[in-house]
Image (cartoon, rainbow, N blue to C red):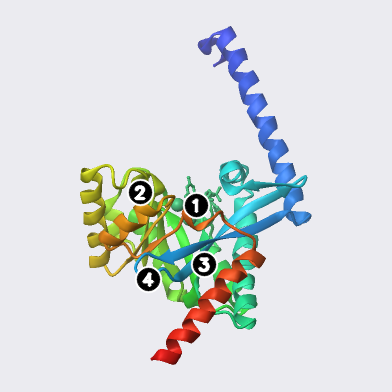
Amino acid sequence: QAKLNGKNHFQFYTAEMEASLSQQTKLEARLKLALQQDEFRLHYAPVMSVQTGRLLGVEALLRWERDGVLIPAGQFIAGAEATGLLPGIGRWVLREACRQHRSWRNAGHPAVTMSVNISARELAEEDFVEGVGHALKETEMQAEWLQLEITEEIGRGRATRLCDRLKELKALGVRLSLDDFGAGAASLRFLQLAPVDELKLDGRLIAALGECPARQAMLEALISLAHGRGMQVIAEGVERSGQLEKLRELACDGAQGYWFGQPMAAGEFERLLSYERFHRKDSSQIS
Ligand code: C2E
Ligand code: MG
Ligand code: MG
Ligand code: MG
């Protein structure tokens, strides 16, 4: 084999492989330590109603506090997935999100949907559904307030087998959201097959909103398609108020993004919950 590849090529290839392998081993060791030493944190991004401006829910986003620096999920999730440690980290995430939700409810805050990102690798784990059930039970969180975000990528290929797994999750009573829709190869088939409650439009679809009429027409069609299936539609990556106005015209249900602020620590998010509590009290007195 080495001869076939040619000597120089072979050596070059090996050196590269070795480098990435040792990097991966290092990351794996470091992530293991991070789990043991409790270096993971969850930050929370509000999901707001486009129609009423009220708080609809919250998305938990993983952070790694490493040497005093907070590293966002986007910078290490793929690496963690490659090391095979993601299911373990994911179990921590799920449990922590449920625990936090329970603790907010215990403190008298209003119930909002708690969304947790699930990667393909986690979803494929034999005991994943069982693990979700456990987390709910242990934390005494009501299933109806937990929403699992899966991505389109998961839907590629074995769509029917995946749908069976999603049905098992639905049987627990949790909600399912299809995250990053429109970022990869848009699978309309999956959108029609999957038992999902929510569609999250990827930020890249939202970015040019207001500048491109064709895109707007496409979004409008997507939103009405999702509504036709009884799904709620959330726009991701909203950064300008103009986008919100457009989304309202398009009958989009909710929005999230930097326009509402950076994802925040639990303590900071409690201020939004208090504000929502105040509003709900207000409207219950009127009605
Ligand atoms: P996502 O689920 O699509 O989450 C949204 C990402 O976009 C977050 O990055 C968030 O901080 C960022 N974001 C929010 N608003 C804006 C905006 O207005 N503009 C732009 N450009 N970006 C915005 P983050 O936290 O780095 O997460 C990246 C991805 O990592 C997430 O994408 C999600 O798929 C994954 N992820 C995050 N937490 C977890 C987790 O606990 N488990 C797993 N398996 N995956 C996670
Ligand atoms: Mg997400
Ligand atoms: Mg995601
Ligand atoms: Mg997304």
Q: Label 3: which residue?
A: 129
The front one of 279 and 95 is 279
From the Cβ of disc 1, is ligand 1 less than 8 Å away?
A: yes
User: Mark 4 or mark 2, which has the lower sequence index?
Assistant: 4
Choose mark 3 or mark 2, whichever is in front.
2
Q: In percent of the image, x 34 and y 54: which residue is there?
A: 159
Q: Measure how far apart labels 4 and 2 are at the Cα level.
A: 19 Å
Kind of residue sitting beneath label 4: Thr
220 relative position to 123: left or right: left
Q: Label 2: which residue?
A: 206
Quarter of the image for residue 195 reads: bottom left
Kind of residue sitting beneath label 3: Val
Q: Label 1: which residue?
A: 258
SS state under label 4:
loop
Tally of marks: 4
Q: In percent of the image, x 39 and y 50: which residue is there?
A: 202
User: Mark 4 or mark 1, which has the lower sequence index?
Assistant: 4
